[in-house]
Structures are given as C-alpha cells and as structure tokens.
Image: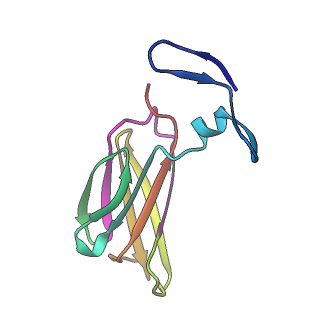
Amino acid sequence: KVHSIMAKGKLVADEIEHGTEGALNTQYLIHGTAKALITFDPASDGTIHRSHNVSSLVDSNTGQFLINVTSAFKDLHSVIVSGNGDNAVHNAANNTNEEQSTTQYKHNHFENNATVDCTDMNSAAFGDILA
C-alpha cells in the first residue's frame, strides 16, 4: 500500500502487497535482505561469478580472501554467512568470516584444520548500510 510518492524518485511504503500471496511490512525488506553477496571460484584465483555491492575480491592466501564492499556498512555488527557450492565431499570443512572494517571482510575456508581452496564459495553479508 503506497501512502505517498515523493518527487525525487522515492517510493514511500509501509507495506508491499502481492495479489495472491498477501502483504509484507517493508521493514523485512530493509533489515532482512543481504546488503552484499558474492559467489566466486577460489581455485581459479577468485573468478567472481555473481556479486552485489562488492567492489573487489582479493586472493590473499590459500583459502583466504578479502571481500571489499562498495557501500560501507554502518558498523562492525554485520552477520556474514558463507558456504561452499562444491558437489564433492569436504572432510571436516568449515568457513569463517571476520569483519576487517566497515568496507571489508575476510573469508577463510578450512578442511582438516588447514586453509584450502575449493571450486565454489558463496558469501552474503547482512547489516545496515551507512546512509
């Protein structure tokens, strides 16, 4: 439901309604949507397959990448999730993400307690973008 439309190309709405699926409060879109995402191939020096709000990817070491975002986050309280898209079995695999600054986070992939490259990595960051 649109309450008003402003002159500078802004749509002001408290709720979005779909004809058959119901309505959704716009706060879910603002707070529940990934503000940065990337899918890339670590085994090929970080070829980016898809990204949103990512300015660059730095292959800093085996299994270690720095992801630079275009629009900075408001603070260092983002939630970053990641996974690998390989169809292979990973032995004792895990991923860690560390915020380095409001414009960069570090992604690590481990198998058997050692950093390794795999063929597909996915990462999404949720948080408030600096206005």
Estimate the x, y position of residue 28 in percent, counting from the top left.
65, 39
Estimate the x, y position of residue 96 in percent, counting from the top left.
46, 63
Q: How many marks?
A: 0
Nearer the observer, 112 or 49: 49
When the figure is inspected, residue 93 is found, relative to residue 52, above or below; the finding is below
Estimate the x, y position of residue 90 in percent, counting from the top left.
47, 84
Left or right, residue 77 beside residue 2? left
Left or right, residue 21 beside residue 51? right
Nearer the observer, 51 or 129: 51
Residue at 41% over, 74% down: 110
Residue at 46% over, 20% down: 9
In what quadrant of the picture does the C terminus appear? top left
Left or right, residue 19 beside residue 34? right
Query: Which region of the structure is painted magenta?
Result: 63-83
In what quadrant of the picture does the N terminus appear? top right
Residue at 48% over, 12% down: 7
Residue at 22% over, 69% down: 45
When the figure is inspected, residue 9 is found, relative to residue 42, above or below; the finding is above
Q: Quadrant of residue 48?
A: bottom left
When the figure is inspected, residue 65 is found, relative to residue 112, above or below; the finding is above
Task: Tell me, yes or no, whether the highlighted magenta stretch contains residue 41.
Answer: no
- Tell me which colouring the rendered structure shows: rainbow
Left or right, residue 67 beside residue 122? left
Nearer the observer, 106 or 28: 28
Task: Tell me, yes or no, whether the highlighted magenta stretch contains residue 73.
Answer: yes
Residue farthest to the front?
A: 19
Estimate the x, y position of residue 58 in percent, counting from the top left.
24, 57
Residue farthest to the top?
A: 7
Q: Quadrant of residue 119?
A: bottom left
